[in-house]
Image (cartoon, rainbow, N blue to C red):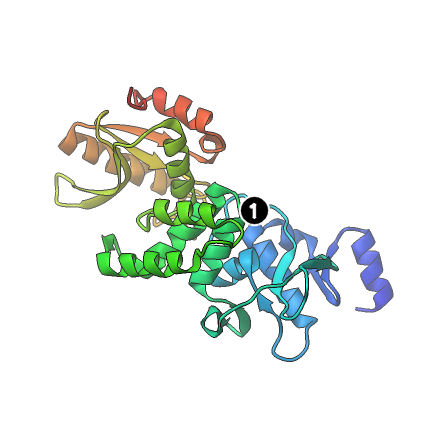
Amino acid sequence: MTERRLREQVAAKRLLRLHRGSYVRASDWSELWWEGQHLLTVLAVRAASQGSGPIFSHTSAAVIWGLPLYRMGIRPVQLVVDGERHSRVIAGVVRRDMQLADADIVEVDGLRATSLIRTVFDVARMSPFEMAVGCADAALRRASVIGHEVDADAERAWRSDANRLALPGRRGVRRARSVFEFADGRAQLPGESVSRVRLRQLGFSRYDLQVPVTGAAGNQYWLDFAFLGAKTFGEFDGEGKYTDPMLRSAESAQAAVLAEKHREDDVRGVTGWGFARWGDEHIRTSAALGSRLAAFGVRPPG
């Protein structure tokens, strides 16, 4: 495309300029989650760089690693520049003055980025708590959970590595330690992680995650939450569970809904427990989730 044609397409809002020399169709951009949009911008910054390229950090490293970032919104690309006296923003890119150990720098799919554990640490100390927890849960799950089974030794090793980075004097260390302590690799989706944050804010403590139930015919089910006092299972139904072909196991949305109903009926029948369901709109605030759970008879203790 000529420069003139590019300017016309950008003016008509058919193309969006990501970075110097990189553009994306507006229609493609609008179909992506925030993480996907940020990853495209990271790739655009890399394309405009020379040599081995910059070292991406914080949320930019997180999207390279494929970690979720709950409601991250539009954020500048973040990278590490050794030798800078102060962090600064140039052309929509945050250039951070950070000292990194050799072990903190890795290559992921041809991109240089902070290591997985360093990335989680930087996100944990500089991001909203619910975003940081979702990111940490996903990383811990990757390190310590196989299927539905938790490797206790691997989990302890992960927490030890994480806390080793949380040295006094670093910005946001207390927040990072709180995130590491709260992280749970059993949470399978960011919505489950944020649900845990809201439950803590509401005062819930007696619940479990990914609880196994064997159905009447021997089918094995795993329930997102189990509220022990209320004898009620909780299920987070995120966007796309029934409609997105990439997320559902059934052939159609109708089949997915029917399969979920059969699953719920089977679980109710063998346990006698109730069900509470909530979605993305209910985890925006603790009050919204509390109201939703109360409608199913699930209330915090005391």
Q: Amino acid at mark 1?
A: Met
Q: Quadrant of the N terminus?
A: bottom right
Above or below: residue 113 compared with residue 72: below
Q: Residue furthest front?
A: 169
Q: Nearer the viewer, residue 28 or 286?
A: 286
User: Hey, which residue is sitting farthest right in the picture?
Assistant: 4
Q: Is residue 142 left or right of residue 46?
A: left
Where is residue 62? Give x, y as percent.
Answer: 50, 58
Residue at the spot x=16%, y=27% of the render? 272
Q: Position of residue 241 (x, y in %)?
A: 41, 43
Nearest the eye: 242 or 235: 235
| Residue carrying label 1 | 72
Q: Does residue 55 appear left or right of residue 143 in this picture?
A: right
Q: Residue at x 48, y 30 (%)?
A: 285
Residue 128 in picture, x, y percent from top left: 52, 43
* Picture residue at 45% right of the left edge, 33% below the top: 283
Camera sees residue 244: no
- Can see residue 161? yes
Q: Quadrant of the C terminus?
A: top left
| Image quadrant where residue 24 sits | bottom right
Q: Say whether residue 266 is left or right of residue 7.
A: left
Question: Residue 232 falls in which quadrant of the image?
Answer: top left
Vertical position of residue 266 compared to residue 177: above or below: above
Q: Secondary structure at mark 1?
A: loop
Which residue of the protein is positioned furthest toward the bottom in this rendering?
Answer: 51
Crowding near the residue tagged with mark 1, few <14, some 14–19, many ≥20 C-alpha atoms within 10 Å: some
Q: Which sits in the foreground, 128 or 70?
A: 128
Tell me the residue at 57%/50% (across/down).
Answer: 34
